Image (cartoon, rainbow, N blue to C red):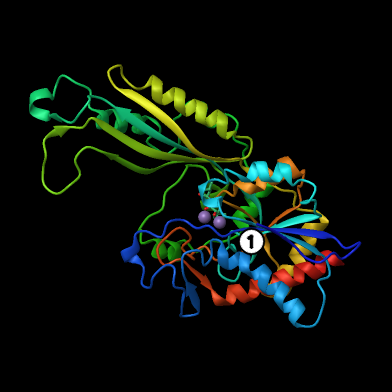
Amino acid sequence: MLARSPDVPGAPVLLVYGHYDVQPPDPLDEWRTPPFSPDVRDGYIYARGATDDKGQFFTYIKAIEAVLGAGQKLPLNLIILAEGEEEIGSPSLEKFLMHHRDELRANAVAISDGSQFAHGIPAITYGLRGLSYLQVDIRGPSFDLHSGSFGGIIYNPAQVLVDILQKLKNPDGTVALPGFYDDALAPENWEREEMASLSVDIESLKDYLGVSELTGEPGYSFTERRTARPTLDINGLWGGFAGEGAKTIIPAKAGAKVSMRLVPNQVPEKIDRLFQQFVTSNCPHGVSAKITNLHGADPVLVPRTTPAMLAAEKAIETGFGKKPVFIREGGSIPVVNLIKKHLGQENILLLGWGSPDDGAHSPNERFHIKDFYRGIRSAAALFHEMAQ
Ligand code: BES
Ligand code: MN
Ligand code: MN
């Protein structure tokens, strides 16, 4: 959906992007209140999409309402682009941007679809990781077999799957896929120092996550591991009998979903190819491996010292009462690179109003009401800073 404010001749144009689609709400029984009946309690609004991304996106609409409600006119030209396919990898957006290139010409793009560095530490995000997301399907015999009658003479697809998955990682947790790190741009020294200067409360994070220990790539800090280094994760795996009790079978098939977060200079299509080659060449004859690509997104870095960035910095200071820090984020927003590529636009302002513990994609997703108001104030201030 595309909307435009009344023309203000000579004033700059700000393109605001947000997405109204959400991740599935399951597991449903873990929600304290139903995911699609927003509930306000303890200063938060709880609902699927509260932070990712309906609540954050809505701040721009409320900012427009506030400006108009105060009897003022908007000081700039706004284009609002609302997408409904972000969470499935934005399959239609590339064509849309190509066809509407002229209508979408702007001085800058604002996207609030991430978070602050921590509670009360607002941030501007200048980097996002990319994504390669693949599914592996291993097929063996035509049907599930008696493991007594046939065990010992045939490849077991579930075993083949876990053998392959195991080979993708080294014992220290680094990725063993050959060539995986070849193009990965290492963070520069100034950046590593900057990241180190942002202190993270690891203890309360462990508490929030419900784990007693964190892990990660040797030689890199927590923040580097989370945002500036590539990863490989199994998102889910299946195969054979997993019901109650025992059933002695050799499954006919097994599968897994694997995602890889990518950093600048890594190319999703190339990583997909390496993955495909590795899995097929490690799959013994007698079973077959089918690899399906589910998502891709390019990693991105945006320039930090543009006039638009300066406007965003001032706007956040107005909205949050504090200067923002500059951070990279570990997630991916496919539109960012599509905007760079098809609109030739580098002034992309990634202004997360949410908090890292909002629970995006999790049950009981929430958005702090305080952050909602800070976001609205920052958005309204951004309109005015851009118009200066
Ligand atoms: N809002 C997130 C991206 C994000 C997460 C930005 C954390 C900053 C911090 C977005 O809605 C999302 O979930 N993206 C997907 C990628 C997409 C191709 C499914 C992701 O990162 O998994
Ligand atoms: Mn989002
Ligand atoms: Mn999301």
> Callout 1: helix, strand or loop?
loop
Locate residue 251, reporting x and y percent.
Answer: 21, 32
Which amino acid type is shown beneath numbered disc 1? Ser
Q: Is residue 228 above or below residue 380?
A: above
Instruction: Report the side of 293 relative to 34 (left or right).
Output: right
Seen from the viewer's position, the closer of residues 124 and 365 is 365
Q: Is residue 188 visible?
A: no
Residue at point 49%, 66% (across, down):
358
Instruction: Report the side of 122 relative to 13 (left or right).
Output: left
- Name the residue carrying label 1: 112
Locate residue 239, reporting x and y percent.
Answer: 26, 37
Seen from the viewer's position, the closer of residues 232 and 89 is 89
Locate residue 265, reporting x and y percent.
Answer: 64, 35
Instruction: Report the side of 287 relative to 112 (left or right).
Output: left
Seen from the viewer's position, the closer of residues 253 and 328 is 253
- For the N terminus, which image quadrant? bottom right
Residue at point 81%, 55% (across, down):
107
Residue at point 79%, 61% (across, down):
310
Q: Is residue 90 above or below residue 375?
A: above
Seen from the viewer's position, the closer of residues 58 and 224 is 58
Residue 96 sits in which quadrant? top right
Residue at point 46%, 41% (across, down):
259
- For the C terminus, which image quadrant? bottom right
Residue 300 sits in which quadrant? top right
Locate residue 191, reporting x and y percent.
Answer: 66, 49
Instruction: Report the side of 199 relative to 203 (left or right).
Output: right
Q: Is residue 91 above or below residue 27?
A: above
Q: Residue furthest bottom?
A: 70
